[in-house]
Amino acid sequence: MSMTGSALWESGMMDKEDSLPDYSTEHVFCRNRLPPRAYFLPAQHLLLSGRWRFHYASSPLEADPPPHKVNAWSLIDVPGHWQLQGYGHPHYTNFDYPFPAHPPYPPSDNPTGLYETDFSIPVDWEIDGGFTYRLRFEGVDSAYHVWVNGKEVGYGQGSRNASEFDISDVVRGGERQKNTLRVKVYQWSDGSYIEDQDMWWLSGIYRDVSLLAFPKKAHVEDFFVRTELDEHYKDATLDMTCWPQLETAARITFQLFDASGHKVIKPQSWDLAAGTFSHDCKISVPNPSKWTAEHPNLYRLSITLSAGDYVLQKIIQDVGFRKVELKDGLVQVNGRPVTFRGVNRHDHHPRFGRAVPIEFIKHDLLLMKQHNINAIRCSHYPNHPSLVAFANEVGLWIMDEADLECHGAGVDGSIIPSDKPSWKGAYLDRMHQLVQRDKNNPSVIIWSLGNESYFGQNHVAMYQWSKSFDKTRLVHYEGGRPYVASDICSSMYNSIDDIANLGQVKEGRDSEKPVILQEYGHAMGNGPGALKEYQDTFYKYRRLQGGFIWEWCNHGLLKKLDDGSGKSFFAYGGDFGDEPNDKNFVCDGLCTSDHQPGPGLIELKKVYQPITVTMKEDTLLVRNRYDFVSLAGLQYTWTITHFPLDGEEQELVSGTEHLNDYQTEAGSEFAIGPFGPRVSKYHLSHPETWLKISFRSQSKLRWAEYGHEIAWAEFRLDANEREWKAPLVASLPAPRTNELGGLLRIHGANYSMAFDPIQAKFLSWSYRGIDLISEDAGPKLTFWRAPTDNDKPGAANVWRGWRLHLMTQEVRSVKHQYIEDSGRFEIVVKSWIAPKVLAWGFETTTTYTIPSQGKLLVHVHATPKGGTPSLLPRVGLEMMLPSDRTVAQWFGLGPGQSYRDMKEAGKIGVWKRNLDDMMVNYEMPQENGNRAETRWVKVTDERGIGLKAALHRQTASDLSSLQHSRTQSTGTQSPSSQRSSVGSWELVQRPKEQSDTRSGRPGFDFAVSKYTSEDLDQAQHPHELRGSKGVNFRIDDDHHGLGSASCGPDTLEQHQLKMREFDFTVILEATGV
């Protein structure tokens, strides 16, 4: 056993306070627990998980039921949490303790679960000298005592850490001999004060329980494999320490195999005398393939312990040759700086809580790799041991974190444990557990001391021990300034300006350490915004080495509705009657609670893509942003495509090329093109001609199929700088109008409209007998959006304070006229649109123009008056369409939602989606489903019949050029006249781009939904959404960005919708009729 492990066992048993239970004092955190060791299971192991007997009590002081009292026991799944199996209830807090903050004492109301199961020793385990037996608990929340056959064998504490207990003296051998295992688990303990992570409070035996057998004569108890590289990072040395337990002499043999199973070195053997406590050895390995997250080359190390010709034990361990160091002020691996494109990850399953099936963990990691994520911070505890093992295989950098957080102790600084000597042993125990379990995994390159535990001498002790025991890794901790207990200047939720300033620091105690954001981009609800700006800043400053998005997934738990339907929803804080709670702050992930990609993850994939592309003249400049590998093995497909007016995409020319090592090595920039000769013969004078490029894998990967898209970019080729005015068309019949029943009715050959001059809105509009809008639901100017989670801490409160959700219209005048020379009918409405109570508002002039064809042009001019808010949620027209308009087709960014600061993942195209697919069903309903940079949109029924819309940003004087959809002549139109007429819908242009960064504000925004902003605003869960009788259709001139202010900076200034004068025209027309 390692010396550290032996000392740890002692410290867990010393200074017992006999007057207090084990679970009520920081001095006792284990009894009879074996020292922590590297994770591996011996050949003889038996999984004890399954259905166990269970008794639930409200307190540890209640008497245990006798085994024969059948009605006192029920059955429960192990692994699992008892709150998810009908006992007690889940409880969510971000950092508040759900009990009085009086460490180390747990509350008297301390639910306790008594578990029992039976097991037998397999008969073949007892031959050849026999075995020693032990029980291994991978995770129990929060503390527990263990009995075997009625005899107490130990006590464990540390919910996310493993414990092993030797039961050799109490176990009965033989398959016919029944052994009874009893475990008493306490929901609360003194350990709960330092397990205050932002997650559900859930209790019980939630990871596997195993029976292990080790050869009694001799076995390797623990081992530590370190890989050293020479100064050129070429040749390697395997530096190994083994801690055997030997009653007899034995021989230990090491063999190394590559991925194909071939021997890399000759077997290396050493004879060990009985009683040998430790053995160190070094083996040279010439120029092995190196391990990185980009190319995870693994070798298999075989450790065999034998006595004579008999093999006593064989251990197989994956080995990756890599060297981690702090060099030149940066985290470097194998001599190269690393950029962390990371995420924070909790263990979570929507049904099982933290009792996560291994396949579910693998699904997470594969999804990360497929979305260009290269690093995980295990927040805020050692995740299931299979995670780091699988990360070794697929290639992910791991920041492995100790099970430590005491955030809630901040209610009174005097109770914070981090600087109290009495808690030192408990703090060190959690660091020992982390390091010892995962020390042989190449994916783990950084140890972390925990999270949000303030700072004190106990952190310094953790840091010093880690650096002394493991010199091959760096150590991280965010708390404490200067960073005396961290090799990294860690920070979280900084603004972009803040990190830019940090990136430029060149002097001071910590200036020779890199800056890494342990948390940023808080992915709660609709967001996060500005990920691209963060990544650009990381790339700009050498000292900035990236960070970890908070966080990977929402933590909703499935809960059945109370209506008897059998349906379930994802519950968050408060849904189980848990008080106090932090509501849906537990739903702040890139993925949904069932771990499916959300819009945030789709956006992140584009932002994190390891290939960036810019355009210089007619040549593409490709930058390889991998840290180690070339782009060999990828192929790229380029396409020049054109979007005809109101038509589908047309490919003009394309090609596919394969990349090789030449000029594509890590960090390089190389040119593709020129494309001028390939496109000059095509009509670049036509609008919306695009060059698209996609980089894909040429072979099947460990984590993705052949042809997986890794990166892409697109560039507009046509200049399209001139705007063409549509000619007037004369000699068209005038619409018929009459005033009946207080309504103004307008009729043409194929259409009819009804306008209410009192309410100043259209009540109906039909074309060829088809209703285009719902009754009494014509277009109106609106400003509100259902607040997002990122709006709620700041912007939404300001908006509500200005009563933007209570805007009303006061009609000042309504005039109408027929303009004979152009054959159009015009209604001009002057209004005061303002909130109740307050004295500010907009003076608006809304001009409804009805060309004889039956289109409707709505020109809005809005001027703010009085003391106004500085920012607005959105501004645009909103209307209700008939309920059968369930198909949206548009030309713009898609297919998913996009906002002005979250649109990098949007691709230009003509997209078509059903109504249900146009919204994002956030677990807390809020603004969603917006599409940005739109040229035109159609909302129709399944037959394609409905309404088409576009938006034009010009003044009313330009309306004469926008009134007719197409000329009535039989001749063909010129290409130029087809480009920018109303009928061709080329009304707003996207500026030509010189990089894959979208700038400016081209196009318009739109959204279609079953729900209004009011519906979304009032509901707390998706199943509470009642919806409306029709389809809500929103066309926005402008829309405020998202930001990440739920826990972080607000929307960047350039993405804010600032108060100003607005002037735009929306053009509506029947389509498909």
Image (cartoon, grey):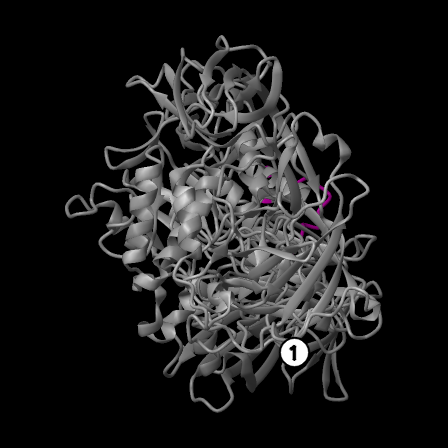
Judged by its main secondary structure, the magenta piece is loop
What's the amino acid at mark 1? Lys
Residue 466 visible in the displayed image: yes
Location of residue 588 (image quadrant):
bottom right
The residue located at (68%, 58%) in the rendering is 150
Secondary structure of the residue carrying tag 1 is strand
Neighbour tally class for label 1: few under 14, some 14-19, many 20 plus, Cα within 10 Å: some
Residue 726 visible in the displayed image: no
The image shows residue 714, relative to residue 729, as above or below, that is above
Q: Whole-percent x and y of residue 224? A: 44, 30
Depth check: 1016 or 717 in front?
1016
Q: Whole-percent x and y of residue 272? A: 46, 20
The residue located at (31%, 18%) in the rendering is 230
* Residue lying at the far bottom of the rendered structure: 837
Quadrant where the C terminus is found in the figure: bottom right
Q: Can you identify the residue that label 1 sits on?
A: 761
Magenta part of the protein: which range? 962-977
User: Residue 425 vs residue 51: left or right?
Assistant: left
Q: Is residue 966 magenta?
A: yes
